[in-house]
Image (cartoon, rainbow, N blue to C red):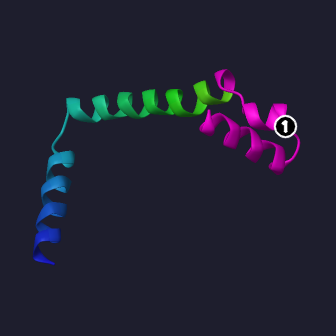
Amino acid sequence: MNIIKNVYVFYKDGFSKMTVGKTLWLIVAIKLFIMFVLLKTFFFPDYLKTNYSTEEERANHVRQELTK
């Protein structure tokens, strides 16, 4: 338990004393949000749901593509 506490205190002190780092972490978080939420939503539609109506058809398509 002491090791976990030491690691927690280490990171807590490090993040609380950051000045430029907080801004950089905010930029990283915004970029990740843009990549995984906005880009996925608008540029990568759900191919299986749009082209196949039932779960069985989707499963057959995936099976055929994997065994090619």
Residue found 68% across the figure and 23% down from its top: 42
Q: Is residue 6 shown left or right of residue 26?
A: left
Which residue is nearer to you in this view: 20 or 47?
47
Residue found 51% across the figure and 27% down from its top: 35
Q: Residue furthest top?
A: 43
Residue found 74% across the figure and 47% down from its top: 59
Residue 45 percent coordinates (x, y): 71, 28
Label 1 secondary element: loop
Q: On screen, 49 above or below 54?
A: above
Task: Determine the main secondary structure of the stretch shown in magenta.
Answer: helix
Q: Is residue 61 inside the magenta stretch?
A: yes
Residue 17 percent coordinates (x, y): 15, 44
**Quarter-wise, where is residue 10 in the image?**
bottom left
Which residue is nearer to you in this view: 47 or 65?
65
Q: Which residue is mark 1?
A: 52
Q: On screen, 6 above or below 42?
A: below
Residue 3 percent coordinates (x, y): 11, 70
Q: Is residue 17 shown left or right of residue 29?
A: left
Which contiguous range is marked in magenta?
42-68
Q: Residues within 10 Å of mark 1 (few under 14, many from 20)?
A: few
Q: Quadrant of the N terminus?
A: bottom left
Instruction: Report the number of discs.
Output: 1
Which residue is nearer to you in this view: 63 or 40?
63
Q: Is residue 14 shown left or right of residue 46?
A: left
Residue 23 percent coordinates (x, y): 30, 30
Q: Residue furthest bottom?
A: 1
Give the residue type at disc 1: Tyr
